[in-house]
Image: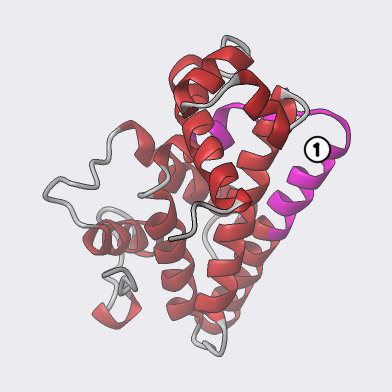
Amino acid sequence: MAGPTRDQKLDTLLAAAAKVFAERGYHETSMRDLARSAGISLAGVYYYVQSKEELLFLIQSRNFEAVIAGMREALDGVTDPLERIARFIDNHLDYFATHMAEMKVLSHEAGALTGDFLQTVNDMKREYTRALMDVLVDIERAHGPAHLNRRVAAYSLFGMMNWIYNWYDPLGDLGIELLSQNVCRLFLGGYVGVPVSEAALPRSSAG
């Protein structure tokens, strides 16, 4: 049986590094810490990356690539604006519920990147934010003007979704589908606002 490929080994290293960065913070983590956590030699780490910053960049860029690709697939062919926002939310939560260390790293360590690494990640963030903004524009066109600033709405939604690493237990009694439905309901209708129909709620593609 063939052993793990180079990409699979890199994925393992990135997952291990994300956990260490999430627990200790990027600046407090050494390359030796990362090698120890991944169960490989320090030389082995340098076989895959040239620096700790490149490792952080790969964690961020690969996860943004994955969630953006999932979003495109989830929205492909869907025209109803409420279903589009539901699918956007569900894709985001479904992915990061199983990558919560990576979510914490994306949320807290972007400022550690510099130069081309920072530019590339910022371009991905802008693409992802623009996609959400476009969905919000479609909702406004279909259902009338919004009652709050679109940028406030977009970043508030990201804030709600990205905070789950602090409290959400994927193995607990709140499944990802119910989590997605509640976030969607809260965003569209408010806690005591206008009720949202069942048709507008996300249906998880997981499992």
> Which residue is more in the foreground, 148 or 43?
43
Query: Who's the residue at 36% across and 41% down the image?
Result: 164
> Which residue is more in the foreground, 56 or 104?
56
Q: Residue furthest left?
A: 173
Query: Who's the residue at 46% across and 58% down the image?
Result: 92
Question: How packed is label 1: few (under 14 Cα within 10 Å), some, or many (20 or more)?
Answer: some
Residue 145 visible in the picture: no
Q: Identity of the amino acid at label 1?
A: Phe
Mark 1, secondary structure of its residue:
helix
Q: Residue furthest right?
A: 115
The vertical placement of 175 against 167, above or below, is below
Toward which corner of the image does residue 130 lie, by quadrant?
bottom right
Toward which corner of the image does residue 165 lie, by quadrant?
top left
Residue behind mark 1? 117
> In screen coordinates, is 171 left or right of 26?
left
Query: Who's the residue at 69% across and 36% down the image?
Result: 48
Q: Is residue 119 magenta?
A: yes
> In screen coordinates, is 55 left or right of 148?
right
| Residue 132 screen position, x and y as percent | 60, 63
Q: Main secondary structure of the magenta part?
A: helix
| Residue 118 screen position, x and y as percent | 79, 36
Give the magenta range.
104-127
